[in-house]
Image (cartoon, rainbow, N blue to C red):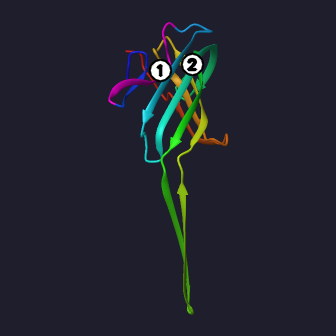
Amino acid sequence: MGRDWSRFRNINGKEEVVNRPFLFPLEPGKSWEIEYTEDHPNKEHKKEQINHHYIVIGWEDVDVPAGHFTAIKVESEGKWKAELEPSIKVGSSSQANRNGSTVVMQSQKVTPQTTTGRLYKAFWYVPEIKRHVKSIEEYYNAGGVRSERYTDELESFAFP
């Protein structure tokens, strides 16, 4: 993790920034982009392209288990685009009774195609403690349905 809380990953043999929630100094209206393309990120995607647009929204009061804070909020709207790997999906079901059994198998050929979705992230950063106290990350599939959501809230802290 970088000093600006950025995350790096080796993509196609090169170290790439895949998340940069903060670009200091944080001032309302400031914006930046993160974009990268990855070959074979998983067994279903031949190629995946990710784009994040970050913007500093402004100051907000936020309550988390660690207490009440005045934080600067950063949001990111993004898009993902994936080229699917060609594959064959196979499914089966069976039923048995005293007269015998029945097995049904079905296979489906997945041809190379492109699919897209969107991303949303929000971070609440508190300068006095030099970290975010809350974050939300959401991932939406091609149909616009949220498929994943991660929330992180600071539970406790102590000044050194």
User: 58 or 104, which lies in front?
Assistant: 104
**Element carrying mark 2:** strand
Q: Position of residue 138 (x, y in %)?
A: 58, 35
Residue 21 belongs to magenta span:
yes
Tally the numbered discs: 2
Q: Residue tagged by mark 2?
A: 54
Residue 143 in view here: yes
Query: What residue lies at 55% left-to-right and 24% top-to-bottom?
Result: 52
Judge whether residue 78 is colored magenta.
no
Amino acid carrying label 1: it is Arg
Query: Which residue shows up at 53% across the image and 58% down it?
Result: 109
How far is the residue under mark 1 from the one under mark 2? 8 Å
The amino acid marked with disc number 2 is Tyr
The boundaries of the magenta stretch are: 13-25
Where is residue 129 shown, x and y percent of the image?
46, 15
Question: Which residue was labeled with disc 1?
Answer: 20
Q: Which mark is residue 46?
A: none
| Residue 64 quadrant | top right
* Disc 2 packing (10 Å; few <14; some 14–19; many ≥20): many
Label 1: state its secondary structure: loop
Can residue 69 be spotted in the picture? no
104 to the left or right of 39: right
In the foreground, 93 or 21 = 93
